[in-house]
Image (cartoon, rainbow, N blue to C red):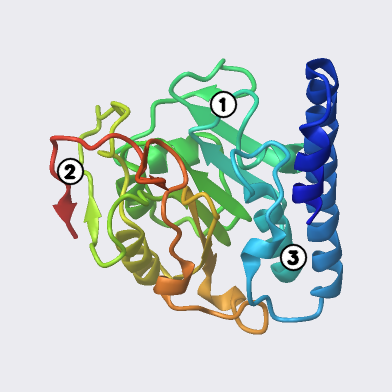
Amino acid sequence: MIKKLFKTIYSNLSKKQQEKALYYYKLSSFFCKNLKADLMRFFMKNRKIKDINLFEQRFYSQNGEDGIIKIIFDKIKTTNRFCIEFGIGPNEGNTIYLKKKNWNCLWMDGNGDGENIRKEYITAENINELFNKYNVSKEFDLLSIDIDSNDYWVWKAINGYFPRVVVIEYNASIPLTESRVVEYDPNLIWDGTSYFGASLLALKKLGDSKGYTLIACDNKGVNAFFVRNDLIKNNFEIKDIREIYRQPKYGKKVNGRYVGHPPSNKSMISV
């Protein structure tokens, strides 16, 4: 109703007035959405979360990951308030908001500045060495993986470290029923196509094997959220993967529907 009213008013404004009206409309929409999410968090404080996507908020994350992470830790609480993120940009990431809230963050990226973001090219072979190099505790609060390539293989390779929450990019272009990943290549760099990462089913199977439960995907179809099994009870209502999966809402549109990144001529492997 509000959107319809805005369109009616907008059509009767001058071009200069339209620019200003659009700016304030977007600004008010942002604050209304975040206010709604904060109110939801307050009322669900002592209840099991059924639909985590209602809590999506975007401050520094690409989509609504900031709000999802907030509600997860509202429920399970924090321990050492330590997080790791690799594949993070200088102005956008899943843990920048946490840094602003005085979390201790280890950020790593192959294009890092060497100061705020450690310049480290991450592979399945060196991930445990890197954790040891930076004195990572065996248990910490959050791990976020977004390297546009070997995400699955890097998470699989982590041994002896037990983050309480794992956020990992998934390839939403792969059908829900298929368990597929890129073939491991330590030098793999994303080429802008649909050849990257792993399907949601492949990640769920990996999470199951490592003691984690898939609890959500953001509405854009970018990141999947896993919580360690010992922290699930009384906090989250577990849904079937068919309810959790989100189709891509990015890339090219075909017949009015997003299809994700351009198709690749490379074939992914089954796991």
Residue that carries the numbered disc 1 in the rendered image? 89
Residue that carries the numbered disc 2 in the rendered image? 183
User: What residue is shown at x 22% (from left), y 55% (from top)?
Assistant: 180
For the residue pair 10 and 86, the one nearer the viewer reads as 10
Q: Position of residue 75 (x, y in %)?
A: 73, 70
Packing grade of label 1 (10 A; few <14, some 14-19, many >=20) is some
Choose the circle earlier in sequence order: 1 or 2: 1
Q: Position of residue 160 (x, y in %)?
A: 43, 57
User: What residue is shown at x 56% (from left), y 26% (from top)?
Assistant: 89
Relative side of 184 to 192, left or right? left
Q: Is residue 255 above or below residue 203?
A: above
Q: Position of residue 78 (x, y in %)?
A: 73, 60
Choose the circle earlier in sequence order: 3 or 1: 3
Residue type at tag 2: Glu
Q: Is residue 82 above or below residue 23?
A: below
Q: Position of residue 35 (x, y in %)?
A: 86, 54
User: What residue is shown at x 71% (from left), y 49% (from top)?
Assistant: 57
The N terminus lies in which quarter of the figure?
Answer: bottom right
Residue that carries the numbered disc 3 in the rendered image? 77
Q: Do the residues labelled 3 and 1 touch (CB within 8 Å)?
A: no
For the residue pair 115 and 221, the one nearer the viewer reads as 221
Relative side of 189 to 121, left or right? left
